[in-house]
Image: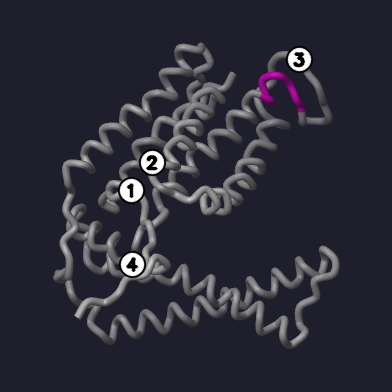
């Protein structure tokens, strides 16, 4: 007897590849970006990542929503460089030790784009990754210890539980009249209260999960069997080869444009 499959039950998990391949993509593509601080290489890298969105079949709305923390982190990282970066060129603002010059502006733009270029691949390749498939790949392809793999899978599966707990706590406190949406001060206080409650709930859930896993023998098995094989196919090798070529493009363009600046030599 066959089970009917409805369109709403079909979830596109993105470009088919081994979960370990996704980890290698992030490492290979972002490694050159750790060596440079110029804005040209970071801008070219972001352009390549944006072009990869339809290839990886990642929804644009999901990418934008998950990129909000990256935008905040990029802004926070570029502000100190803007005010206290290496001086050079025309000075636009000066107060005590803070100096805004042509060189500091270029460094701030480079840091802003660089943080985005490093974080955006994580957002793209993490879409559609199943924690169980990732655990099998870590154990069978990278041959990591079983205890580490099982702990990683359990931690990733708890991320969705954290989001559900946050929504449940928000609805419960709202129904009891404990949340006031008027004014920034009230919203900040409500957010801090929810964060503390979520922390307590997470610690309780982690303790319960660790005891349950230990009772079922997960802590004592040095070698485990897996219900499904996760092999490294030819398409994974092709994807990694393409990634190596794409990772060299931003650096090559910045060197050709004469804007290449090695990290640590920002003068």
Which circle's residue, 2 or 4, is located before the other in the chain? 2
Can the viewer see residue 263 in this picture? no
Which circle's residue, 3 or 4, is located before the other in the chain? 3
Q: Which mark is residue 144?
A: none
State left or right for residue 61 relative to residue 12: right
State left or right for residue 139 relative to residue 202: left
Q: Which residue is mark 4?
A: 153
State left or right for residue 11 relative to residue 164: left
For the N terminus, the image quarter is bottom left
Q: Say which residue appears at 61% left-offset and 41% top-offset.
A: 74
Q: Which residue is mark 1?
A: 15
Q: CA distance from mark 2 to mark 1?
A: 7 Å
For the C terminus, the image quarter is top right
Q: CA distance from mark 2 to mark 3?
A: 43 Å
State left or right for residue 194 relative to residue 226: right
Q: Are marks 2 and 4 in contact (CB under 8 Å)?
A: no
Q: CA distance from mark 3 to mark 1?
A: 48 Å
SS of the residue under disc 2 = helix
Disc 3 versus disc 4: nearer the observer: 4
Magenta part of the chain: 99-105
Q: Nearer the viewer, residue 102 or 29?
A: 29
Q: Which residue is mark 2?
A: 55
Q: Which mark is residue 90?
A: 3
Residue 39 higher or lower than 199, as above or below:
above
């Amino acid at each position: 007897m066959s089970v009917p499959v409805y369109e709403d039950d079909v979830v596109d998990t993105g470009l088919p590849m081994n979960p370990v391949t996704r980890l290698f993509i992030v490492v290979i593509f972002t490694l050159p970006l750790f060596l440079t601080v110029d804005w040209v290489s970071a801008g070219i890298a972001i352009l390549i990542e944006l072009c990869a969105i339809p290839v990886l079949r990642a929804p644009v709305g999901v990418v934008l929503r998950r990129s909000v923390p990256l935008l905040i982190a990029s802004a926070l990282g570029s502000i100190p460089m803007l005010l206290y970066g290496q001086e050079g060129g025309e000075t636009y603002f000066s107060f005590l030790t803070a100096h805004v010059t042509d060189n500091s502006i270029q460094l701030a733009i480079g840091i802003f784009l660089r943080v985005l270029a490093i974080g955006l691949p994580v957002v793209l390749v993490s879409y559609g990754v199943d924690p169980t498939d990732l655990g099998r790949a870590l154990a069978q392809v990278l041959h990591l210890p079983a205890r580490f793999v099982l702990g990683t899978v359990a931690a990733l599966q708890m991320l969705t539980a954290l989001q559900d707990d946050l929504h449940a706590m928000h609805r419960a406190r709202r129904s009891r009249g404990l949340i006031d949406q008027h004014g920034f001060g009230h919203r900040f206080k409500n957010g801090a209260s929810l964060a503390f409650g979520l922390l307590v709930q997470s610690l309780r859930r982690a303790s319960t999960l660790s005891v349950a896993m230990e009772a079922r023998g997960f802590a004592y098995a040095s070698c485990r069997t897996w219900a499904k094989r996760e092999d490294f196919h030819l398409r994974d090798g092709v994807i990694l080869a393409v990634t190596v070529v794409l990772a060299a493009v931003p650096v090559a363009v910045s060197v050709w444009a004469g804007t290449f600046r090695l990290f640590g030599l920002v003068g």
